[in-house]
Image: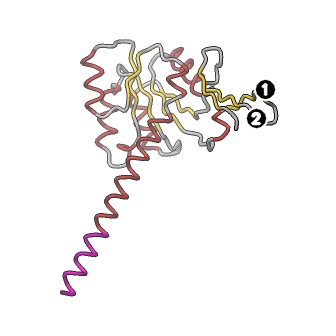
Amino acid sequence: MGEVVVSSSSEEEEGMVVEFETEKDIGSSEVVRWEEFLPRMVLSVLLVEADDSTRQIIAALLRKCSYRVAAVPDGLMAWETLKDGHHNIDLILTEVELPSISGYALLTLVMEHDVYKNIPVIMMSSHDSISMVLNCLLKGAADFLIKPVRKNELRNLWQHVWKRQTVCFTFKLVLFIFLAWFVFLHMIMEVY
């Protein structure tokens, strides 16, 4: 059998590499990228950043990580973009300090909305005060990134969407099972 070696290297810009030896060619190894085995799903990120150059840099990094990006300069435009619905936003990446509506106020609006509350919101700031991070996480933020953000952090944003979808699916499944059990018990009680 072939040996599987999983490694992560700073030289490998694309991430994790899986190497294995085949039985035919003992001693030779073939490099296989794990991304090739995953289904391709393009996620849409709403980037909210007031600084033009920072917004352009982060948007370019997100695109290099294969995300679709809708970038806006303030919280009010972000809220309008969400309500517009044309972008089918999967994740929101927002600066805490923004003009018109702050990132924290945007987080509050999203978390209190029936439809949008399932969209993961990731806050970012160059200020790393514990109280700011804690307030955002307690309000419902999925994560908090300290600027400057790194490509590796952005590459893994999809995990927040996956976690939210898994939690929502699990909750719906448990609710369905509970209701089915309740109906079943009710039917049995009527028979007796």
- Residue sitting at 34 percent across and 39 percent down? 110
Q: Nearer the viewer, residue 143 or 189?
A: 189
**As drawn, 114 above or below 179:** above
Q: Which residue is mark 1?
A: 28
| Labelled pair 1, 2 in contact (Cβ < 8 Å) | yes
Q: Which residue is mark 2?
A: 22
Q: Residue 106's quadrant in the figure?
A: top left
Q: Amino acid at mark 1?
A: Ser
- Residue sitting at 44 percent across and 28 percent down? 93
Q: Position of residue 123 (x, y in %)?
A: 38, 25
**As drawn, 74 above or below 170:** above
Q: Amino acid at mark 2?
A: Thr
Q: Quadrant of the N terminus?
A: top right
Q: Position of residue 48 (x, y in %)?
A: 45, 26
Secondary structure type for disc 2: loop
Answer few, some or many: residues within 10 Å of disc 2's Cα (few below 14, many 20 plus, some between 14 and 19): some
- Say whether disc 1 or disc 2 marks the residue closer to the N-terminus: 2
**As drawn, 171 above or below 4:** below
Q: Disc 1 versus disc 2: distance between alpha carbons?
A: 7 Å
**In this image, 13 relative to 136: left or right?**
right
